[in-house]
Amino acid sequence: MKKHFNIRVFGLVQGVWFRKNTKDQAVDFGLTGFVRNEKDGSVYIEAEGNPAELLSFVEWCKVGPTRAAVEKVIVEEREPIGMQAFHIQ
């Protein structure tokens, strides 16, 4: 059964290839959804997939790519909406 997570990542997460690495990780985990930068400096992610892979993905988000400095991650579970592929917005 698929799940859908809305994820907000705070800290030094823009200008450090966070979105590109997020897409690569999501694809590796077999997730669908999107990632985008927010005006407040955070990164917003919506991801759908199997629960175990989503939880592993969230753990990755807590660290991010090498140059990132993640301070906080907020995860909200929502109803799956049938997202296709994974995109950078």
Image: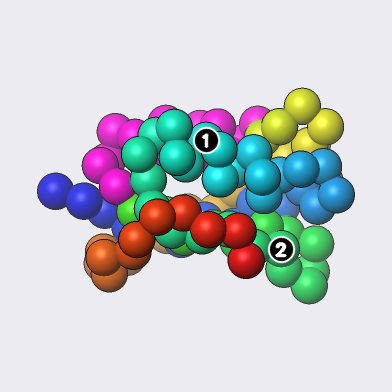
Q: Residue drawn at (39%, 34%), measured in percent from left and top?
A: 29
Q: Residues within 10 Å of mark 1 (few under 14, many from 20)?
A: some
Q: Residues within 10 Å of mark 2 (few under 14, many from 20)?
A: some
- Residue placed most toward the observer, 35 or 44: 35
* Residue 73 x, y percent position in the rendering: 60, 48
In the current view of this chain or complex, which residue is farthest to the top? 66
- Residue placed most toward the observer, 20 or 8: 20
Is 6 above or below relative to 59? below
Check disc 1 and report its element: helix, strand or loop.
helix
Is 85 above or below relative to 62? below
* Residue 27 x, y percent position in the rendering: 45, 40
Q: Are marks 1 and 2 in contact (CB under 8 Å)?
A: no
Residue labelled with disc 2: 37
What's the residue type where badge 2 is placed?
Asn
Residue 55 sits in which quadrant?
Answer: top left
Check disc 2 and report its element: helix, strand or loop.
strand
Q: In the rendered structure, which segment of residues is drawn in magenta?
A: 49-63
Residue labelled with disc 1: 25
Is residue 53 visible from the viewing direction of this image? yes
Q: CA distance from mark 1 to mark 2?
A: 17 Å
Q: Main secondary structure of the magenta part?
A: helix
First in residue order: circle 1 vs circle 2: 1
Q: Residue drawn at (30%, 47%), measured in percent from left and top?
A: 49
Is residue 72 visible from the viewing direction of this image? no
Q: Is residue 57 magenta?
A: yes
